[in-house]
Amino acid sequence: KAGVTQTPRYLIKTRGQQVTLSCSPISGHRSVSWYQQTPGQGLQFLFEYFSETQRNKGNFPGRFSGRQFSNSRSEMNVSTLELGDSALYLCASSSGLAGDTDTQYFGPGTRLTVL
Amino acid sequence: AQSVTQLGSHVSVSEGALVLLRCNYSSSVPPYLFWYVQYPNQGLQLLLKYTSAATLVKGINGFEAEFKKSETSFHLTKPSAHMSDAAEYFCAAKGNNDMRFGAGTRLTVKP
């Protein structure tokens, strides 16, 4: 089975711009979660989508949004970029059906740099 | 909500020595626990997970972890470190659909 893929791998944007990141989960997985990883804050949960619906949400401002398509692919959008949004954005896929025992499999991440 | 504490942001061992990375969770109900490894510029790779079936969990690359409820711990060990084990390791806990990660421990392996 192919793993989780994320595109693009690297992005450079300027303050005020918006950005869209893409994630394709493992075939058959219906849940996609997004995380932000920074040296200062570590790994922080952004949100989870399951069957095209947002199922869980972390504590991030409304500038961060996402969606999931019928093929389970997910996109994450950040509007009005700030310098502090520079981070590695990780996507994780899981079946979405096993509750707390569900294992998340991570993609390689998208490195976003905001100048 | 549970929280995860990893003791030691940096651990350095010699090649062939025992690796011990510490993880403690804080939760009134034991959560499901995971260890992940992250190599530079890569995502997280699952090493092992605890789901209450057995307290000693064996993972990939020779790693194992033991769940100790009395100590609220889930420490990761490997009998003999290899140079390729140098990476960052994350402990995570999941309960009530809430996944929390520890701050990570960077493992350095000296030749």
Image: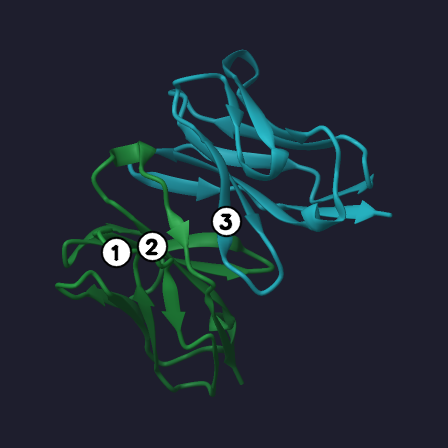
Chain colours: A green, B cyan
Using the numbered discs, state the Cα–Cα distance from disc 2 to disc 3 in whole angstroms.
15 Å
Decide: few, some or many residues near mark 2? Use Cα within 10 Å; few <14, some 14-19, many ≥20. few
Judge from the rendering whether residue B107 lies leftward or rightward of residue B53; answer left or right: right
Q: Residue A100 location, x and y as percent?
A: 31, 33
Horizontally, residue B55 falls left or right of residue B89, namely left
Circle nearer the viewer, 3 or 1: 1
Of all residues, the one furthest to the top in this rendering is: B70
Q: Which numbered tag is attached to residue A27?
A: 1
For the residues labelled 1 and 2, the Cα–Cα distance comes to: 7 Å
Q: Secondary structure at mark 1?
A: loop
Answer above or below: position of A59 versus B48.
below
Chain of the residue where label 2 is placed in the rendered structure: A
Residue A65 visible in image = yes
Q: Amino acid at mark 1?
A: Ser
Secondary-structure class at tag 3: strand
Residue A75 versus residue B15: which sits nearer the camera?
B15
Number of other residues with Cα within 10 Å of mark 3, as a class: few under 14, some 14 to 19, many 20 or more: some
**Residue ID at (57%, 26%):** B65
Q: Are marks 2 and 3 on the same chain?
A: no
Q: Which residue is mark 3?
A: B45
Residue B74 visible in the displayed image: no
Query: Which residue lies most toward the right here?
Result: B111
Asked if marks 1 and 2 touch (Cβ < 8 Å), the reply is yes
